[in-house]
Each structure stands twice: as C-alpha cells, then as structure tokens.
Image (cartoon, rainbow, N blue to C red):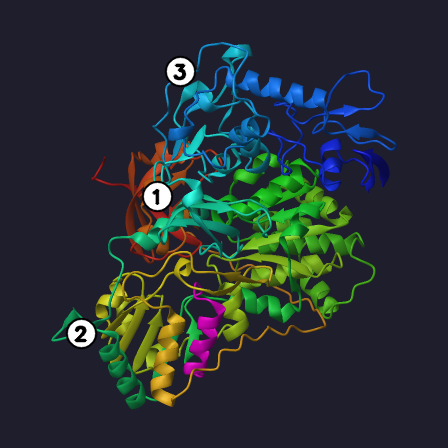
C-alpha cells in the first residue's frame, strides 16, 4: 500500500494504481472520456488532467500516471477548469452539433461535460466532419462524424473480445476508426462497442429514433439465454423493451454477447401465443383460461399417477419447484443434466467467473466464444492481461488457439485420453499434489498405468512433445482452472480427477440454457423413462419428437409459440417469456439471481408459475409447495476413473462431424428473434480447403449421418484438420445431432 494526498485528503491505495483510481477512491470528481476500468490506460482525451505538486509539467494525465508514495495531487483548480474547457472546445471543432437527432443525447458524456464546464461558444473554427454514415452493417450504425477518437470501441474489441474488428485508420487529422479497407462490419456483434462509446458514433439500429433515454424505464434482469447468468438492464418505454445494456456489477462485469444485447425481440415475434387453445374435432381453436383449466384438472384427476411433467431449463426456480410440487414422481428436466450429476459424484464445487481471471493456467476444451461468449472474455483477460498459460485441447483450432502455443489437436472424442495421459505422466514424475485429500487415488493410478506417452499419442493423435510440454505447464501451475461447456459425464469425471491432482476442488461447468443449474438443484438428473409409459404429458416450454407423443390420452403444452409439439397437443397454453416474469435463475456458479419483469406478457399469456398455481388450487384447493432446495454435495471429494469411448468412422461415413451452436443462437428461442436470424439465418458447415476441393464440393453440401441428412451452406476454415468438419447448428435444423458424429459429405444438386 502507498499513501498519497488527493485535494488535501490523505488516502491509502494499492501499489500500481493510477492517480485516477486513487482520485476515484478519494471521492474526487475527475472527468474522463477515454477511460474504462476494464481497459488498459490509454490517455487519448486528456480530460482527466490533474496538477501534481513538484512536477515539471503543468498538468498530468491521471489515467495513465502511476500513483507513488507521498504524491500530492489537485484535481480541480481554475487552471485545470480552463484547460479542460479548451480540450472540449478542440473536440467540438469538427464535432457535429446534432444533439436533437442523436440517439445518445441524454447519456452522452461529451454533452454532459460541455454542460458541466459551461462551454457555450467555441473560440476555434473549423469544418465539421462530413464522412458518409455507414448503414451497411447488421444491427450497428456507424456515424464517424461524431467520433472523438477515444479508441474505446477498438480497445474493447481487441482487449476484451479479442476480435479487433475495428482500429485506428490513417494518421493525423485524417485518423478515424474503421475496418480494414472500410469493409462492412463482420464481427461477433456483441454490441460492447455501442455501450462503451461515450458519444453517438455507434448506434443500435433497434433503438434508433424509437425514444429518448430519459423516457425509458430501466429494469434489472438476468439474460434468458445461457447459464453464465449475465446481469443486464432492460430499457423500455410503455412496457416495450427498446434496448438492453450490460451491468458492470454482475458476474459478467459489463460483458454481453449478441444474444443478450440484441436477442430480446423474440418476445415480440408475430406468432406469439396470446390465448389458450383447445383441440376440438382435430383442430386447435381459441378458448379461455377457465375452460382450459377445467379440462386440464378433469384429465389430471382422471389420469392421476399416470401424468408426466417435463420442464424447460429456461423456467425460473420458482416455476420448476412449483411443478415438482404439482407432480412429485413423473417429472424431469427436458435437458440432459448428467454432466451436473457427474460433478456431484466427485464432490467438487462449482467454479466462479472470478477464478478464471485469477488463474495462472487454463485448460479449455471447446470454443467458448460460440457457446458461452462472455465467459470467453474472462479467458482473454487472464491470458492477455495476467499472462496466464492457456492449454487448448480440441479436435480443431478454435478462436482462443491464437492466444496460445499450447494447442493439443486431438482425435475427435479422445479428450479424456489426453487427460488420462497428462495424469499418468504427473504420477510418473511425482508431480501430483503432496497433500491429496480425495478418495480413490490408488484405483486411479491402476487405471492410468496403461497410459504411456506412446499409447496416449497413438490413441489421441496428440504429438508427444506437445503433450509433455502441456503436462509440465499444468503441473507447475499454482492456480489452474479447467473450463468445460456442456460436456459428457465422463469428461467431467476425468477433468475433476485432473484438478484433484493439483489439490483444487472447483470445476467450471457451463451450460446451454439459463437455468440448468437451478433445474438440477430442484430436480436432480431424473430418469425420463416415464415419457413413454405415461398416459398423459404436460410439456412446459419444451418439445418432444412426434413419435414420443403417439398413443397419449392427453397432452398439455405451455409455450411461447405454436411449435410442432404444440400442434399435436390437446390443450395449448400461452406462456410468459423469461423477460416477462419475476423469479430467480441459478447460474453456473450456483449463484441464485433475481430477474424482474421488463415487459408485460402479450394479451392473456401467463407465467408458468401462475399456470401451475391455478391448476394446483383447482385440484387440491391450495398452491403447490415451491421451496427451492439447495443441492447438498458430498463433503469428501473423490476421483472417478474415466475412459474415452471411440467414435468409429467407416467407408460410408469417412468424416468426423463436430456439431456446436453458433454464437448467435441458443435453442429454438433465438429462431424467433429477427435480429439474431439476420445475423445467422441458417446452419453452416466448415471444413478445410483441401477436403472441399478433393470432394468437389460447392456452396451447398449434403451431410449424411446415421441420424439423417440435411443440406447446408459450406465454407472453408483453415483451423480444421483433414476429414474433420464442423457444423454450426441452427434452431431450424430438423435433425438433432450428437456433438461428434460419423458423417459423409457430398455435393448437392441444388446450388445457390
């Protein structure tokens, strides 16, 4: 700690802090335009000037100057006010005075500072910027005439997102922020550049000209997509969400992805269900809630003990718990939660987001930038800012691979073999933690005895030198972190054992849906065999294939849209979306987070909690018990040996087909978002150039797997090895594929 004086106030602050950080701690008001605590100091705007006693310079930029012991700083004086006013005048020389039509008006930092410092006229003259406005991009409009060259958009795109889509172009008075060769934006569309821009140079097309910010109502919500559980602020007018911003106080620390930022419009889809439907004479016709509830209660009473209930992992904890109170026995989550059950077996705890930033070695097994984009930014921070070692174990080169030289290209499905090889080598070199506290290490050692370097190399396809180097890096780390996204149960067991060899007991498990952890803590990973035997089914926010619904006496569906499953149902109930109700979600850390209603449900739609409560009252005369139990884990951790199950190719299926979600979609919900469908309207196949040319494939390719066929657009990706293709899945795909499948790829007669 160091001691310094700010405006006559003595404070203590951590060594390495800047003067600006010290001033903020002291409560001083130092204005900034280019500063953001998430970014490296830049010093572009010079608004944060302060006076430093004993300095040879008149003014000192506080955001880039380290604080030192005994330093005496003044943050306000007549000279500083005059200097800051001059800087604002210089910024306004070329800046258009179009506040009345600028969507940033009301929360523009430049506008606020001009008002604060009383800049009513400009002593300097010059031509106003007259660059063409870029309307070409999806969702983001760029008006460089308003840009003040603070560099925030370029820096967050590079430092946090690791995309570097925009940067400074040209020099001197011709400098601007742009893409290479002024091409249209083609990025991850996280929207961070819009949020961080202090002026109106970057605008969301969804919000443009729709409202003034002072007309908006702000509601704190939790993102309804993946289970990172990002804290967001929904900004609405007259009950309609117009924009969503990230909150810096949540687990995401200001981060957001395309789904969270732009994907809220799924709740305004034209085909939302707005009133109950009842099947009569083979057709679903509009009805009212009283008739629908009476029919459901009548059938539930008739089929008592023979009804099954399937719930979506996007429901709130309260809704899932109430559903359990309605049906204790035949109830399960629609999503496979075996990976969370496997973690419970090991006794390990859930890792937290902050652990990623503070780790010195990260093992990554999938492309987080596609599956859980905000979590990937924490990996970027750890590697780029904290110089953590990153080890990527994957069948292909992923986005994070460019941050590391420790890329272990593994035969698809053999990640567990690599983990076993690393553990076996650690035991051989006696690199395991000396204070091992877990049970089962002797059986694990016996299991690993066969995993020699040669055998591991042969089975996994990983080069022995790369494997040994990665093993040493992991073994020498002090605070390692392993991140898995929607993994297999055996991969969870193997990764848990690898962590325990270092004496660590937290595993980072990320999921696809917003409340997978909450569903597991309420229901566990229940057997779904009742689906086939039950005479009736109540499906809440989920779908089943048509063959699973045959010969059912009664089917109820509560959903947002008339899905294929809903069309088969006897009763269809209009449900409220995650953005349209209050409740809690449990994120991947196990943290229970409150979300509030940011937009009312359409017409007669009700939340699933209201639906369940009313049914329970009509059946039993009281509301269902809706306690939310916390999962109890074993206190004693243990290792569980695991082995990879080979995925065999054949002459009929000579390719490994990897299937993973695109970063723009999450289940079928996102298919109803016009914004996300604009960014990604269809599935996409990626493969290396040599394979594509060898097979004579053009723009469209027919994929054939044991589960069925589909035709998709094909593009080249140099990160894929021979005979490995990657399918970026899409909610409109008619077949559901495993993460790894044997496949055949052929040209299609239908070309674009």
Q: Residue at x 66, y 53 (%)?
A: 421
Q: For marks 3 and 2, give the one nearer the viewer.
A: 3
How many neighbours does mark 2 have within 10 angstroms: few (below 14), some (14-19), or many (20 or more)? some
Q: Does 328 appear in magenta?
A: yes
Dot 3 corresponds to which residue? 130
Residue 628 drawn at (x, y percent): 54, 74
- Image quarter (top left, top right, bottom left or bottom right) of the N terminus: top right
* Mark 2 residue element: strand
Which residue position holds label 1? 675
In the rendered view, does 48 fall on the left or right side of 341?
right
Which residue lies at the image location 33% right of the left edge and 61% below the top edge? 601
Task: Give the secondary structure at mark 1.
Answer: helix
For marks 1 and 2, give the CA distance.
33 Å
In the foreground, 261 or 166? 261
Magenta residues, as a range?
Answer: 313-329
Residue at 73 percent of width and 52 percent of height: 425
Q: Is residue 241 above or below residue 440?
A: above
x 47%, y 40%: residue: 190
Relative horizontal placement of residue 728, taking residue 536 as reference (left or right) = right
Label at residue 279? 2
| Residue 724 appears in the picture as rendered | no
Question: Is residue 107 one of those drawn in magenta?
Answer: no
Q: Earlier in the sequence, mark 1 or mark 2?
A: 2
Image spot of residue 61 (x, y percent): 71, 24
At mark 3, the secondary structure is: loop
Q: Residue furthest left?
A: 281
Give the class, few, some or many, for how many residues have Cα within 10 Å of label 3's Cα (few <14, many ≥20): few
Residue 228 versus residue 160 in the image, above or below = below
Q: Nearer the viewer, residue 733 or 619?
A: 619
């Amino acid at each position: 700690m160091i001691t310094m004086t700010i405006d006559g106030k003595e404070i203590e602050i951590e060594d390495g802090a800047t003067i600006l950080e010290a001033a903020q701690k002291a409560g001083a008001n130092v204005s900034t335009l280019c500063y953001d605590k998430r970014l490296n100091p830049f010093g572009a705007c010079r608004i944060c000037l302060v006076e430093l006693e004993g300095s040879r310079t008149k003014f000192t930029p506080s955001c880039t100057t380290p604080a030192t012991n005994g330093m005496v700083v003044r943050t306000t004086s007549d000279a500083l006010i005059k200097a800051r006013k001059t800087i604002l005048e210089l910024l306004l020389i070329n800046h258009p005075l179009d506040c009345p039509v600028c969507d940033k008006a009301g929360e523009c930092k430049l506008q606020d500072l001009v008002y604060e410092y009383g800049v009513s006229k400009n002593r300097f003259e010059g031509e106003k910027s007259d660059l063409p406005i870029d309307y070409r991009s999806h969702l983001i409009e760029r008006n460089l005439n308003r840009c003040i060259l603070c560099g925030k958009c370029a820096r967050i795109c590079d430092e946090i997102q690791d995309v570097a889509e925009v940067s400074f172009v040209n020099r001197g008075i011709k400098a601007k922020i742009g893409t290479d060769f002024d091409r249209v934006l083609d990025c991850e569309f996280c929207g961070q550049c819009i949020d961080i821009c202090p002026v109106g140079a970057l605008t969301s097309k969804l919000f443009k000209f729709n409202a003034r910010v002072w007309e908006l109502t702000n509601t704190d919500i939790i993102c309804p997509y993946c289970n990172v559980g990002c804290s967001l602020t929904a900004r609405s007018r007259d009950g309609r969400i117009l924009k969503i911003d990230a909150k810096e106080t949540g687990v995401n620390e200001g981060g957001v992805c395309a789904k969270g930022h732009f994907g809220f419009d799924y709740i305004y889809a034209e085909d939302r269900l707005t009133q109950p439907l009842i099947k009569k004479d083979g057709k679903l016709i509009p009805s009212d809630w009283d008739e629908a509830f009476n029919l459901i209660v009548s059938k539930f009473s008739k089929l008592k003990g023979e009804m099954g209930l399937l719930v979506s992992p996007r429901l709130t904890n309260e809704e899932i718990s109430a559903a359990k109170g309605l049906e204790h026995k035949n109830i399960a989550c629609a999503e496979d939660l075996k990976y969370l059950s496997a973690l419970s077996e090991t006794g390990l705890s859930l890792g937290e987001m902050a652990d990623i930033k503070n780790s010195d070695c990260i093992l990554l097994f999938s492309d987080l930038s596609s599956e859980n984009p905000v979590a990937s930014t924490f990996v970027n921070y750890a590697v780029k800012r904290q110089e953590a070692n990153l080890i990527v174990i994957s069948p292909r080169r992923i986005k994070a691979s460019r941050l590391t030289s420790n890329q272990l290209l593994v035969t698809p499905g053999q990640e567990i073999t690599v983990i076993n090889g690393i553990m076996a080598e650690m035991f051989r070199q006696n690199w395991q933690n000396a204070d091992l506290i877990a049970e089962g290490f002797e059986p694990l050692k016996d299991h690993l005895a066969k995993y020699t370097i040669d055998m591991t190399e042969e089975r996994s396809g990983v080069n022995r030198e790369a494997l040994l180097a990665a093993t040493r890096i992991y073994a020498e780390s002090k605070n390692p972190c392993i991140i898995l996204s929607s993994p297999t149960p055996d991969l969870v067991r193997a990764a848990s054992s690898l962590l325990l060899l270092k004496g660590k007991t937290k595993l980072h498990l990320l999921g696809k849906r917003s409340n997978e952890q909450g569903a597991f803590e309420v229901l566990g990973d229940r057997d779904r065999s009742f689906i086939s035997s039950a005479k009736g089914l109540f499906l809440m926010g989920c779908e089943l294939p048509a063959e699973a619904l045959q010969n059912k006496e009664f089917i109820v569906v509560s959903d947002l849209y008339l899905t294929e499953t809903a069309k088969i149902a006897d009763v269809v109930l209009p449900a409220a979306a995650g953005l349209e109700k209050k409740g809690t979600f449990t994120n991947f850390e196990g943290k229970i987070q409150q979300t509030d209603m940011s937009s009312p449900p359409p017409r007669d739609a009700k939340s699933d909690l209201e639906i369940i409560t009313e049914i329970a009252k009509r059946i039993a005369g009281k509301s269902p018990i809706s306690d939310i139990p916390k999962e109890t884990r074993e206190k004693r951790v243990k290792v569980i040996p695991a082995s990879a199950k080979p995925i065999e190719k054949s002459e009929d299926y000579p390719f490994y087909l990897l299937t993973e979600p695109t970063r723009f979609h999450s289940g079928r919900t996102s298919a109803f978002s016009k914004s996300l469908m604009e960014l990604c309207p269809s599935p996409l196949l990626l493969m290396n150039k040599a394979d594509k040319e060898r097979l004579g494939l053009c723009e469209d390719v027919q994929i054939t797997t044991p589960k069925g066929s589909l035709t998709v657009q094909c593009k080249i990706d140099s990160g894929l090895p021979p005979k490995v293709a990657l399918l970026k899945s899409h909610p409109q795909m008619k077949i559901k594929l495993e993460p790894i499948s044997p496949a055949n790829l052929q040209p299609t007669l239908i070309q674009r």
